[in-house]
Image (tube, rainbow, N blue to C red):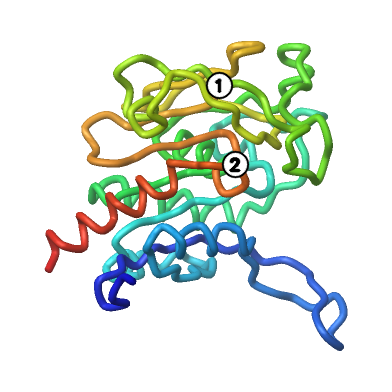
Amino acid sequence: MINPGERPLIGICASRETASWTVWQRQPAILVGSAYVDRVQEAGGSPVIVAPSEPADLRVLDWLHGLLLPGGLDLSPSGYGEPVSPECEDFDPARDEFELALAKAALERDMPVLGICRGLQVMNVALGGTLLQDLKSALGTDTHRVTVGSLDEGNAHTVELAPDSLASKIAGRSTIAGRSHHHQAVDRPGTGVVISGVSGPDGVPEAIEIEDRAFAVGVQWHAEATPDDSFIPAFVKAATTQRSSRA
């Protein structure tokens, strides 16, 4: 068993939502999917829920050893200088502003960062990249979100990882089956962003890495829901190394 004092502190960004629990119905809440928390704990990390703030309070990074950017709503196209297309879905500009600032600051200090689904897109936009606002209208494909609201095996597809990439080293192979739930994707990569994985069926970017960073990886599939995932354990291991170097 890992000594709690030796576990790295992993910040997981939360969102403002309306939720119901026990006798409380449709109340404002700060939420994080429990699967993110569970996978981080199983990998040896101590999750820290990071609530959005206005303006973004970046001091929280002083206490963390790694930052996990989870899935969620679309990003507002205003964040990458484009008008909103009719196919763009719900977005939360306040959440966008907070997570983009946090991601940029974490990457600047070379903190281990893992972006999952929306989180990958946040990383790319934080570094000046853009997004395809809707895959079906842009590419004619709808294989990345077959069943809305589900991360079961029916929403899995193959991802081809670039040889010698960090992603392929983490996976231990060149092809994986990731459980997917997205209708947007990287269009123009941001500064230092390298596409290290693409969808087998259609070549849509599915994994990114940031140049000259010890561990800055984004995966478009939901690693927290993919059986035998190796990306969250690798991320927590990188955060453990940072914790040791700080100590």
Q: Amino acid at mark 1?
A: Val
Q: Residue furthest front?
A: 1
Where residue 57 appears, as percent x and y from the top left, is 40, 68
Front residue of 137 and 113:
113
Where residue 171 appears, as percent x and y from the top left, is 41, 31
Where residue 7 appears, as percent x and y from the top left, is 30, 69
Q: From the viewer's perspective, tell me whether residue 246 is left or right of residue 201.
A: left
- Quarter that holds the C terminus: bottom left
Q: Which residue is mark 2?
A: 226
Local SS, label 1: strand
Q: Quadrant of residue 200?
A: top right
Q: Is residue 224 above or below residue 55?
A: above
Front residue of 190 and 208:
208
CA distance for labels 1 and 2: 12 Å
Where residue 204 appears, as percent x and y from the top left, is 59, 17
Residue 159, numbered label: 1
